[in-house]
Amino acid sequence: MSSTAPPPSTHIDEDVPQNEGSKLKTFISILRKFIGVADLAAVRFSLPSQLLEPTPNLEYWNYLDNPSAFAAIGTSDEPLDRMLEVLRFWFTKDLKYVKGKPCKPYNSCLGEFFRCNWEAEDNAPRIDTKSLTATSSGNASSSSSVKSTKNIGNGATNGDPRTTSTVSVVQTATNPAGPTVRISYLTEQTSHHPPVSAFYVSCPDKGLHAKGFDQISAKFTGTAIKVSPGEHNLGIFITLERRDNETYQLKHPAAHLGGILRGALSVSVGDTAYVTCPRTKLKAILHYIEEGWLGRAQNKMEGVIFKYDPEKDDKIRIKDVPDADVVARLGGVWKDKIVFTLGPKPLDSHPADKQTTIIDLNPLAVAPKALPPKEKQAENESLTLWDGVTQAIRAKQFSKATNVKVELEEKQREKARERERKHETWKPVFFDQVTDKRGTPDLTDKGRQVLERAQKGDWNLEGII
């Protein structure tokens, strides 16, 4: 099979703009031809330009929708608080699906890369569970940074309007007035078969970095698309360099793109996610509940943080965790608001004023990126590589967009044929490995140089590539 399958034979007049309903009908007619295909992502079929979002895949797939939440990881001296900092970030990483519609970006080309910065406000509330314990016993510390908020309506269990506390992050401002922390990001498409990209997030001001491989497996069931982590996607690995390289592994759950037949696309999750830290011996199980009464998505999540043995990591369900090992419980709606309580007691048994909001997504929006100027971008940098397609789609010149896209994809196939003729093996530029069984890509010297320059606001690639 060719590296990118041509569009199925469903015919549309690309020069006639389609409304959302017509686009969806076309999308469904294409998907039906792939019922039974084990992995849509491996097929990498090419959609008509009208059905594409004018966004490169590598720009779209990142986890820094709220960079302030990432920058705050590792602030606390307490292991439980640091786990909660990681989970607060986790609950912000899919903000794009909560605030925007699901979309299909461009397929990435081998060797394509994307880089950007975020200017994160250094203003996330400190998580201090010791002060919460003191508060519950009537000895609240005056120095507690946990905010008390009237009428927050946590919404996790009973929407009780009584006073409760929050450590939720705030919206990242377009032009931050307070102190900021710069976060730099680099990702490269390291494999075409299967499609895999490596990424690295660097925040030296906080002694913090994250890395991993992105790969998905997708299957159309006839009513929805199930999207699961691919075999090389072992999650996000976050390392706290200033805490003896304490590392957290965040494993993704499977998700469903539903509402296809109703004409209202939405993302739901009905699976379990895991966050582990072998050094602190703390683990979190997050159970997402997809469907409710009459099949309506609830988007609920219930979770537990507990002490575990990294050498015997055998607890995969919340009900398997002994109460004696539980240090905190979480619950709520992952598209809305999540709260946590301390200790093994069921979350619902705690009054509203003893529940702490860890994240409230309602006031948040996806944070803006700082991008390299066009003149500083390489030809295989995502925004430049796909610029012709993007401009044509935005101008609603869909036939032109398709032609430009086909030419670009054919160039990639010709490069692959040339490597085959010369018996050459393609190697990534910025990462050491195409894939890795550990799930943790390593930067090359060139990758490190790109991120070091990005940290200085220097987008020049001279002397690197």
Image (cartoon, helix red, strand yellow):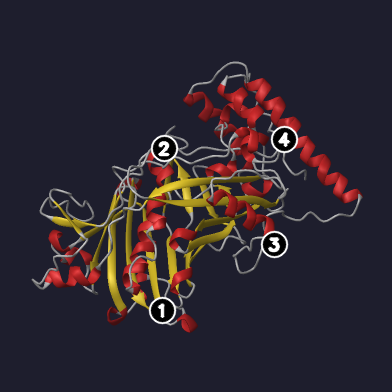
The amino acid at mark 3 is Asp
Front in this rendered view, residue 397 or 137:
137
- Structural crowding at the residue carrying mark 1, measured as other residues with C-alpha within 10 Å and reported as few (<14), some (14–19) or many (≥20): some
Residue 153, image x, y percentages: 17, 49
Determine which residue is flagged by label 2.
100
Q: In the rendered image of this protein, does residue 327 appear above or below residue 67?
A: below
Q: What residue is pinned by disc 1?
A: 281
x and y percent of residue 259 in the render?
A: 43, 39
The kind of secondary structure element at disc 2 is loop
Determine contact: label 4, label 2, CB under 8 Å.
no
Tag 3 and tag 4, C-beta contact below 8 Å: no
Q: Is there any visible trace of residue 216 in the rendered image?
A: no
Give the Cα separation between the discs numbered 4 and 1: 49 Å
Query: Measured along the vertical axis of the image, is residue 363 above or below residue 405?
Result: below
Q: Earlier in the sequence, mark 3 or mark 2?
A: 2
Q: CA distance from mark 1 to mark 3?
A: 30 Å
- Indicate the position of residue 345 as horizontal and vertical percent values: 21, 72
SS assignment at label 4: loop
Task: Give the structural element (helix, strand or loop) at label 3.
Answer: loop
Q: Amino acid at mark 2?
A: Gly
Disc 3 from disc 2: Cα separation: 34 Å
Q: CA distance from mark 3 to mark 4?
A: 32 Å
Residue type pointed to by label 1: Lys
Q: On the image, numbered disc 4 is attached to which residue? A: 6
**Quarter the N terminus occupies:** top right
Measured from the top left, where is residue 442 in percent x and y?
63, 63
Instruction: Work out whether mark 1 precedes mark 2 in sequence or the reverse, and give the earlier one.
Output: 2
First in sequence, mark 4 or 1: give its number.
Answer: 4
Residue bearing mark 3: 432
The residue shown at (39%, 62%) is: 73
